[in-house]
Image (cartoon, helix red, strand yellow):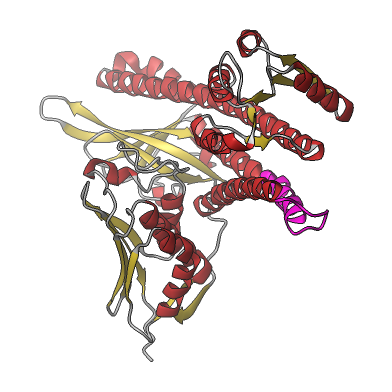
């Protein structure tokens, strides 16, 4: 079934009726849009409360409230739609501030170019629709995860209930044998009984279907032929994860979780006689996790193509391919290109993080000069260092070589340097130094920023971590997570030493391939 075509609804607010009429005619002439106009921001807000809107265009100077106040209130009703602010040249600074304060998508100076306005509106609507689709997918995932969570809770309760029931029945086997056999044989989960020495004593049909093993009384079966790992039987009830059952007939591996409970015949002296293991097939759970990860990977991958196209189009404007630009137009297009590049960087980081987690990204290691590599990384952020007049000192020995994936390691160093620059005050110090022994290359970056509270340090390398409770970071939370993944993929480790108010030292170590020159 084809997706039903949706007419985008655009809300225009300006106290001058001539401007709203002109914009409405232009948009309806050039595109299939439902354009609603108001000359009063108060009336526009009343309309926005009750109606679905895809994009808002607002004037800055209006008698009842200015454009920033109006768009701030609009965000309460429509959090993810694109907002465009029309300003005069004198109000440009306010418009730029509104990008962070209000979440403004774009601002345009009066008088505007119609072609430029149409492109801005088209891109804004595409952004709004992408957010809308993303929210729908997130809701679907949340619903699926909630169902799965409820299923797991119910299943765990059922396993616990049946395990307790089985133990009670075994204490009075003569009178409860029929009930026990019925429960044992009809349970959807696999159940096995194992002796203290690890010999398989009894199985139920669900386990036999899962493993392809038909057990007969008196037959000894080695559990290592069935389970991928040792069950690690103890005197305590345990839940074992990350196990697989090898099917003897189909040769198919089934991922399982195993709940192991010791059974005591004599409850007074706690004599352990055997173990009951309840085996749960978690194939459905893993498939749900895979679908979630595939969704994230597909979404980020599909976003790259339109972003590249938008950046290329802006480059055509900026390099004069489609005609000359005045200074104002050039400044606006540079801002648009910067925003698109930031979004593309976020998409690339998401895709990179997914590839590391799913084991799809492989390192391409080579030997290279450590000092030259550090210098090249510093050149990448040299403009930021000079802008803040930061004093950068480097203590890296010449002629030392390192064995790693150069491009991936560069991503780590530039990320750590960028963080250090961002959180170090004007004219303060940043130090880069190395410590090399026979086994490891240790690289440290020390800044004189605000530092990180000790309680926030363990969370800092988590995916989507927003820094600390002190609002150290407002980024996506992928930079340090991805850095940790890259260092771990090299067989190294990354760590942080910090004291709140006194700066931080990020350190990472890589196994060294000994090459002395």
Q: Residue furthest left?
A: 269
Task: Decide which of 216, 276 is in the foreground and name it.
Answer: 276
Q: Quadrant of the N terminus?
A: top right
Task: Decide which of 208, 495 is in the foreground and name it.
Answer: 495
In the image, is 495 to the left or to the right of 294?
left
Task: Decide which of 126, 65 is in the foreground and name it.
Answer: 65
440 relative to 152, above or below: below
Q: Is residue 460 magenta?
A: no
Residue stretch rendered in magenta on the structure = 302-326
The answer to whether residue 97 of the structure is visible from this angle is yes
172 relative to 492, above or below: above
Answer with the quarter of the image where residue 160 lies. Answer: top left
Q: Is residue 305 magenta?
A: yes
Q: Residue at x 51, y 31 (%)?
A: 206
> Where does residue 313 sit, x and y in percent of width and height?
76, 51
> Where does residue 5 sit, x and y in percent of width and height?
83, 24
- Chief SS of the magenta region: helix
Q: Quadrant of the C terminus?
A: bottom left
Task: Decide which of 186, 482 is in the foreground and name it.
Answer: 482
Q: Residue at x 41, y 22 (%)?
A: 153
In the image, is 390 to the left or to the right of 414?
left
Q: Residue furthest bottom?
A: 517
> Where does residue 161 sit, x and y in percent of width and height?
35, 19
375 relative to 283, above or below: below
Answer with the quarter of the image where residue 38 lies. Answer: top right
């Amino acid at each position: 079934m084809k997706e039903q075509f949706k007419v985008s609804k655009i809300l225009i607010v300006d106290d001058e009726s001539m401007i709203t009429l002109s914009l409405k005619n232009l948009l309806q002439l050039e595109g299939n849009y439902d354009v609603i106009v108001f000359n009063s921001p108060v009336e526009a807000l009343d309309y926005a409360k009750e109606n679905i809107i895809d994009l808002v265009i607002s004037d800055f100077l209006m008698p009842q409230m200015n454009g920033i106040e109006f768009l701030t209130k609009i965000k309460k009703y429509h959090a993810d739609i694109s907002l465009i602010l029309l300003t005069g040249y004198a109000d440009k600074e306010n418009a730029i501030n509104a990008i962070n304060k209000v979440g403004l998508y774009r601002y345009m100076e009066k008088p505007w170019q119609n072609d430029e306005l149409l492109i801005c509106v088209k891109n804004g609507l595409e952004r709004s629709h992408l957010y809308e689709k993303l929210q729908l997918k997130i809701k679907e995932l949340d619903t699926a995860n909630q169902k799965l969570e409820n299923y797991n809770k119910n299943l765990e309760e059922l396993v616990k209930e049946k395990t307790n029931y089985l133990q009670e029945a075994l204490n009075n086997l003569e009178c409860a044998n029929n009930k026990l056999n019925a429960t044992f044989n009809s349970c959807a989960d696999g159940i096995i009984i194992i002796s203290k020495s690890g010999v398989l004593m009894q199985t139920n049909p669900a386990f036999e279907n899962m493993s392809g093993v038909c057990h007969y009384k008196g037959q000894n079966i080695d559990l290592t032929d069935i389970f991928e790992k040792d069950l690690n039987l103890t005197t305590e009830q345990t839940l074992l994860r990350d196990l697989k059952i090898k099917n003897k007939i189909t040769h198919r591996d089934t991922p399982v979780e195993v709940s192991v409970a010791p059974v005591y015949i004599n409850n007074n002296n706690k004599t352990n006689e055997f173990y009951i293991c309840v085996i749960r097939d978690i194939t459905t759970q893993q498939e749900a996790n895979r679908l979630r990860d595939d969704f994230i990977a597909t979404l980020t991958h599909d976003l790259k193509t339109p972003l590249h196209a938008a950046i290329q189009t802006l480059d055509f404007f900026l390099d004069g391919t489609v005609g000359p630009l005045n200074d104002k137009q050039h400044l606006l297009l540079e801002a648009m290109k910067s925003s698109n590049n930031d979004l593309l960087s976020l998409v690339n980081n998401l895709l990179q993080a997914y590839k590391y987690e799913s084991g799809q990204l492989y390192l391409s290691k080579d030997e290279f000069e450590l000092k030259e590599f550090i210098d090249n990384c510093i050149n990448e952020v040299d403009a930021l260092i000079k802008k803040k007049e930061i004093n950068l000192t480097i203590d890296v020995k010449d002629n030392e070589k390192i064995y790693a994936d150069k491009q991936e390691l560069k991503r780590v160093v530039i990320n750590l340097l960028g963080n250090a620059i961002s959180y170090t005050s004007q004219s303060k110090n940043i130090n880069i130094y190395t410590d090399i022994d026979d086994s490891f290359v240790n690289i440290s970056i020390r800044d004189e920023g605000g530092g990180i509270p000790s309680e926030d340090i363990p969370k800092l390398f988590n995916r989507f971590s927003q820094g600390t409770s002190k609002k150290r970071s407002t980024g996506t939370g992928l930079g340090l997570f991805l850095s940790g993944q890259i260092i771990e993929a090299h067989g190294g480790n990354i760590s942080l030493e910090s004291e709140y108010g006194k700066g931080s030292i990020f350190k990472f170590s890589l196994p060294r391939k000994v090459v002395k020159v």
